Image (cartoon, rainbow, N blue to C red):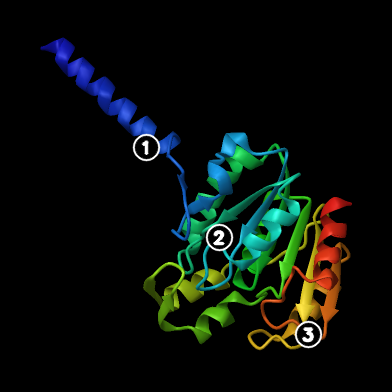
Amino acid sequence: MRRCLAFAALLAMLSVLASTVARAWEYGANRAFAVYIEDGVRGEDLRDDVIVMFHGFRSAMPDYYFRILTPEFGDNHSVVGFNYDYTDVDRNIAEFEDFYGRFLGHRNVVFFGTSLGGFWADYFGARLGVGKVILINPAIDPQATMRRALGTNESRRRGITFEVTEKAIEAYAALELTPADGTDKLVVLTRDDSVLDYRAAEAFYEAQSHAAVRVYDEGGHSPPLDQPRFLDALKRFIDR
């Protein structure tokens, strides 16, 4: 009887340890908190050089930019898409930092983000001390972005509806973008962005000594990065 009780206690202890230190990562398309990597590669199989991509609001990985950057940089880099949750700020931080700590901390990493994903790329870039960050029409004031979406929203990529609440807006407002001396940034802005006012991001990043700001007349909110005028700037920044 005592052996049975001791064995049961051991199983319970192992169960607790497994739940706290051995969480299994999900890999797949579109799902929140899933990592997307083409060809079935797993974290331990990543190359030494990695590009981590953060999608925009209501979007998901693999998005348009993932499909552009993978063939352009995939020969030398592993390209990874992180599917964050639009409103769960605390879990976004916990999940991504767990993934980063397991698989990315000892690698050469570039963060890439567009729109709301630009905020996350910049935030994590400073928080984790990565060397390079690429921002495409980034949302530097995410609480304002979320407030415009207050209420019920739809993500066609994920096939879901979700609620933006005051609580989510307050959670974003509690986060701050802070420049990091060891992080170089390439900021791509377009004057005809119909979603965000490029001038706010232009002023914010031009005040940072480690940020190179490129402003283009045309391209819209999601500029076609496969065009040479954009792609050449990305290649020079990543390859230098």
Secondary element under disc 2, as helix, strand or loop, is loop
The vertical placement of 78 against 237, above or below, is above
Label 1 is placed on what type of residue? Ser
From the top left corner, tell me how far across and down residue 135 is, in percent: 73, 67
Secondary element under disc 1, as helix, strand or loop, is helix
Residue holding disc 3: 218
Please tell me how crowded label 1 is: few (under 14), some (14-19), or many (20+) other residues with Cα within 10 Å: few
Between 106 and 8, the one nearer to me in the picture:
106
Label 2 is placed on what type of residue? Pro
Residue holding disc 1: 19
Mark nearer the viewer, 1 or 2: 2
> Residue reaching furthest left?
1
Residue holding disc 2: 62
Q: Quadrant of the N terminus?
A: top left
Q: In the visual, does 185 lie left or right of 125?
A: right
Please give the name of the residue rendered at 61% of the width and 51% of the height, measured from the top-left corner. 80
From the top left corner, tell me how far across and down residue 98 is, in percent: 53, 44
Asked whether the beta carbons under mark 3 and mark 2 sit within 8 Å of each other, the answer is no
From the top left corner, tell me how far across and down residue 128 is, in percent: 68, 50
Mark nearer the viewer, 3 or 1: 3
Figure label count: 3
The vertical placement of 66 against 44, above or below, is below
Residue 207 visible to an observer of this rendering: no
Between 120 and 177, the one nearer to me in the picture:
120
Separation of disc 3 and disc 2 at Cα? 24 Å
Label 3 is placed on what type of residue? Glu
Question: For residue 90, which numbered disc appears in the image?
Answer: none
